[in-house]
Image (cartoon, grey):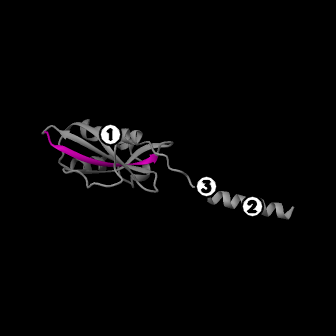
Amino acid sequence: MKGLVVVILLSLAVAGTGCVRQLRHDPALAASSAQKFVELLAVKGDVNGAYEMTDPASRHGRSAADLGKSVSSVPIGKLDDVAATEFQPVPGQPAIDIFLKGHNTDGKTIHFAVRVNGTADDGYAPASMAVAFEPFPASSMRRSLQ
């Protein structure tokens, strides 16, 4: 009986070390979340709605008002449209970077990179955003959403 207990415990220990959660991503679902976030912020001006979408773990004590101040400090103007164009999984993390392009009312192209935390099974929530007036540097890991 003692030998059987040892075998069961060893089996459980080995099985436990092999249970690494596979990260299953859905780039289209992640892109949809990122695009809605940027649309709320930069097209509709709905800071509260965008804030409610964010990953609570990424807020670090910041409020919707803080998000609004951050967004208003970047002179992007009012966007007419925005579209997700590319994605890049974050290796080993439940996150994807989504790259988007928008056009403001002055006809200028604005580039966004939104990191969304989550997986295909759990859904995605925006965690951070970067804004640029030039395309973000290329990466061999980046893929088109088209």
Q: Residue at x 50, y 50 (%)?
A: 23
Residue 65 on the magenta span:
no
**Residue 75: x and y, percent?**
17, 48
Q: Is residue 75 left or right of residue 7?
A: left
* Alpha carbon separation for disc pair 1 and 2: 48 Å
Q: Specify the amino acid type for callout 2.
A: Leu
**Residue 33: x and y, percent?**
38, 40
* Alpha carbon separation for disc pair 3 and 1: 33 Å
Q: Main secondary structure of the magenta part?
A: strand
Q: Residue at x 78, y 61 (%)?
A: 7
Q: Which mark is residue 19?
A: 3
* Region of the chain picked out in magenta, as a range: 107-118
Q: Is residue 145 left or right of residue 78?
A: right
Q: Are the residues at dot 2 and dot 3 in contact (C-beta closer than 8 Å)?
A: no
**Residue 138: x and y, percent?**
28, 54
Q: Is residue 7 left or right of residue 25?
A: right
Q: Residue at x 44, y 42 (%)?
A: 26
Neighbor class of circle 2 (other Cα within 10 Å; few <14, some 14-19, many 20+) is few
Q: Specify the amino acid type for callout 3.
A: Cys
Relative height, residue 17 to residue 101 (above, below): below
Neighbor class of circle 3 (other Cα within 10 Å; few <14, some 14-19, many 20+) is few
Identify residue for label 2: 9
Residue 46 visible = no
Residue 113 on the magenta span:
yes
Relative height, residue 4 to residue 36 (above, below): below
Q: Is residue 14 left or right of residue 84?
A: right
Between circles 1 and 2, the one closer to the viewer is: 2
Identify residue for label 1: 35
